[in-house]
Image: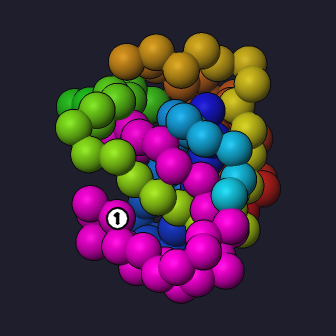
């Protein structure tokens, strides 16, 4: 699992289950979320997690829509967590990720 930095002050990062290694796009691409990428961008593909309920630490995998993200904003690799459909993030991990931002 990876964490992706955002520009949103309310949501500083997203969690993603990567399904590919980093690839360089040969042509422009628009993913199913509407994000646009130029030829030559280095990207990863996978699925986002979203907050479940009122607590950011509770996350659920969104399997319906595959996402593409640029590799550059990846800020943390969560090797200590299994990429399951739902999980509860430990507060200490959340704090370590925030320190990377």
- The answer to whether residue 47 is left or right of residue 40 is left
- In front of the other: 70 or 5: 70
Q: Point out the image quarter for the C terminus.
A: bottom right
Q: Residues within 10 Å of mark 1 (few under 14, many from 20)?
A: some
Residue 19, given in percent of the width and then of the height, sits at 54, 36
Q: Quadrant of the N terminus?
A: top right
Residue 69: percent from the left, percent from the top? 53, 61
Numbered range of the magenta stretch: 24-51
Q: Which residue is mark 1?
A: 31
Q: Residue at x 62, y 62 (%)?
A: 43
Quarter of the image for residue 94 reads top right
Q: Is residue 80 above or below residue 61?
A: above
Q: Residue shown at 33%/28% (left/top)?
A: 60
- Residue depicted at 47% across the width and 58% down the height: 68
Residue 42 visible: yes
Q: Nearer the viewer, residue 39 or 66?
A: 39
Colouring scheme applied when the structure was drawn: rainbow
Q: How many marks?
A: 1
**Was residue 30 drawn as part of the magenta stretch in this picture?**
yes
Quarter assignment of residue 30 = bottom left
Q: Is residue 26 left or right of residue 15?
A: right
- Residue found at the far front of this picture: 26
Q: Position of residue 63 (x, y in %)?
A: 28, 32
Q: Where residue 81 appears, x then y in whole percent?
A: 64, 18
Judging from the image, what secondary structure is the residue with disc 1 in? loop
Q: Residue at x 59, y 53 (%)?
A: 44
Residue 56 in view of the camera: no
Residue 34 found in image quarter: bottom left
């Amino acid at each position: 699992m990876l964490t992706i930095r955002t520009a949103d002050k309310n949501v500083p990062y997203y969690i993603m289950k990567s399904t590919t290694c980093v690839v360089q796009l040969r042509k422009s691409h628009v993913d199913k979320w509407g994000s646009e990428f130029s030829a030559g961008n280095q990207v990863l593909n996978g699925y986002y997690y979203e907050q479940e309920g009122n607590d950011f630490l509770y996350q659920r995998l969104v399997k319906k829509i595959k996402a593409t993200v640029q590799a550059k904003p990846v800020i943390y690799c969560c090797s200590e967590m299994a990429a399951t459909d739902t999980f509860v993030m430990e507060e200490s991990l959340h704090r370590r990720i925030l320190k990377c931002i």
